[in-house]
Image (cartoon, grey):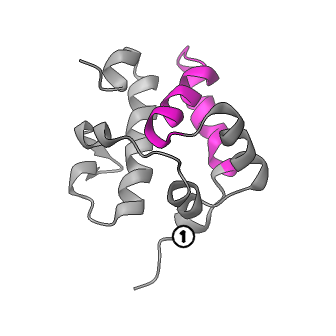
Amino acid sequence: MAKHRIYAMSFASVYPHYVAKAEKKGRTKAEVDQIISWLTGYGQKELQAQLKKQTDFETFFAEAPEINPSRALIKGVVCGVRVEDIEEPTMREIRYLDKLIDELARGKAMDKILRKE
């Protein structure tokens, strides 16, 4: 089975859309970066390096320093698909990030987005 085309897309090409979606709803780039860091373990310098290298989505998640185990608490629908039901691991990680950005844009509190008790 062929890989989904999003795997080959550069993370840097989609990142501005994440930021724009958040800023349009009164949130900040720093909050987007905080979500990405929470999910992947990338620090600010590492994230900037990945953006500069034009890393594709598959590599971005494969090279993530520390995927957050609490991401399993992320539930809901993105693009008409339940994120918890996605079997392919890389696609699930991408959709987790999409879901977190959606929650940010909808005004959810950061503590809830980052699944803090």
Q: Is residue 108 visible?
A: no
The residue sitting at 53% across, 47% down in the picture is 65
- Asked if residue 102 can be seen in this view, the reply is yes
Residue range of the region highlighted in magenta in the rendering = 12-41
What quarter of the picture does the C terminus occupy? top left
The residue at the point 38 percent across, 39 percent down is 99
Based on the picture, tell me whether residue 15 belongs to the magenta stretch. Answer: yes
On the rendered structure, is 36 left or right of 76? Answer: right
Q: Position of residue 5 (x, y in %)?
A: 54, 70
Q: Nearer the viewer, residue 30 or 49?
A: 49
Q: Quadrant of the N terminus?
A: bottom left
Q: Among all residues in the image, which is located at the extreme right?
A: 52
Question: 100 and 43: which one is in front?
Answer: 43
Q: Where is residue 23? Give x, y as percent.
A: 60, 21
Residue labelled with disc 1: 5
**Which residue is nearer to you in this view: 43 or 76?**
43
Label 1 CA crowd tier, 10 Å (few <14, some 14–19, many 20+): few
Q: Nearer the viewer, residue 21 or 89?
A: 89
> What residue is shown at x 55% (from left), y 17% (from top)?
27
Determine the image quadrant of residue 85.
bottom left
On screen, 56 above or below 18?
below
Residue flagged by tag 1: what amino acid is it?
Arg
